[in-house]
């Protein structure tokens, strides 16, 4: 039988969880995100969600629950980043029509229907195939900037190439990828 916790018990439970899991959880999150600031933001979201849930119902396996919530928060962060990437690649200069908005919504939907899973796999296959067609320098800049979240300043330090050249390489990569995804989008609309 699960009983409701009294307010002081809830605070005690939360403080105990923070003491017991705080360092390990932060380390877990840091290994999966690019910056300490992102890790701390995600950890703060986890603690906030813990206090909200504890107020509603007790948690039986606190550690497992905390790590699952952290994993979900990390996934949400990358999903938002992926949405932005797909928006940039699917829509030229921010201009989107109703059909292309529907495609983006379907691709980013949390529903796992056979249709959405198939479309997602087609888009990712096409994206990676198009990336393979790019010159190595353009592909590397695109991957670093969009998928690994490196700034142009960081890339310039790593490569010794000036920032304008790196921006130009990324622009050419985006134009090529947009063209390839546009063809896929046209093919999907015809289905």
Image: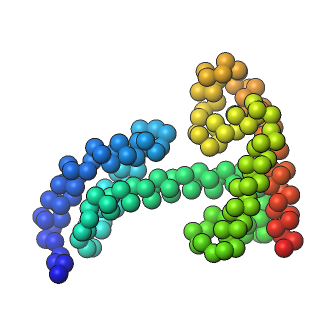
Q: Is residue 16 above or below residue 136?
A: below
What residue is rendered at 61% in x and 68% in y?
A: 109
Residue placed most toward the observer, 1 or 171: 1
Side (left or right) of 46 relative to 105 = left
Residue 123 appears at what percent x and percent y?
A: 73, 58
Residue beneath the point at 59% across and 27% down: 154
Q: Locate residue 1 relative to residue 72 in the image: left or right.
A: left
Residue 190: image quadrant is bottom right
Which corner quadrant of the image does residue 137 belong to?
top right
Name the one closer to the observer, 101 or 179.
179
Q: Residue at x 38, y 60 (%)?
A: 68
User: Can residue 37 be seen from the camera position used here?
Assistant: no
Question: Which of the colour schemes (rainbow, by chain, secondary structure, one colour) is used?
Answer: rainbow
Viewer-proximal residue, 166 or 114?
114
Q: Position of residue 58 (x, y in %)?
A: 23, 71
Residue 189 in view of the camera = yes
Up-down: is 158 above or below 92?
A: above
């Amino acid at each position: 039988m699960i009983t409701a916790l009294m307010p002081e018990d809830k605070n005690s439970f939360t403080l105990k969880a923070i003491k017991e899991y705080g360092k390990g959880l932060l380390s877990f999150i840091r290994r999966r995100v690019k910056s300490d600031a992102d890790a701390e933001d995600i950890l703060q979201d986890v603690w906030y969600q813990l206090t909200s849930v504890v107020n509603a119902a007790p948690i039986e396996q606190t550690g497992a629950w905390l790590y699952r919530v952290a994993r979900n928060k990390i996934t949400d962060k990358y999903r938002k980043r992926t949405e932005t990437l797909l928006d940039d690649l699917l829509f030229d200069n921010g201009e989107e029509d109703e059909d292309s908005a529907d495609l983006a919504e379907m691709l980013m939907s949390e529903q796992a229907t056979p249709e959405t899973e198939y479309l997602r796999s087609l888009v990712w296959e096409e994206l990676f195939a198009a990336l393979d067609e790019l010159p190595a320098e353009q592909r590397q800049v695109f991957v670093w900037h969009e998928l690994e979240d490196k700034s142009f300043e960081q890339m310039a330090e790593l490569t010794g190439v000036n920032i304008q050249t790196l921006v130009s390489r990324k622009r050419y990569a985006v134009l090529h990828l947009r063209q390839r995804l546009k063809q896929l989008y046209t093919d999907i609309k015809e289905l």
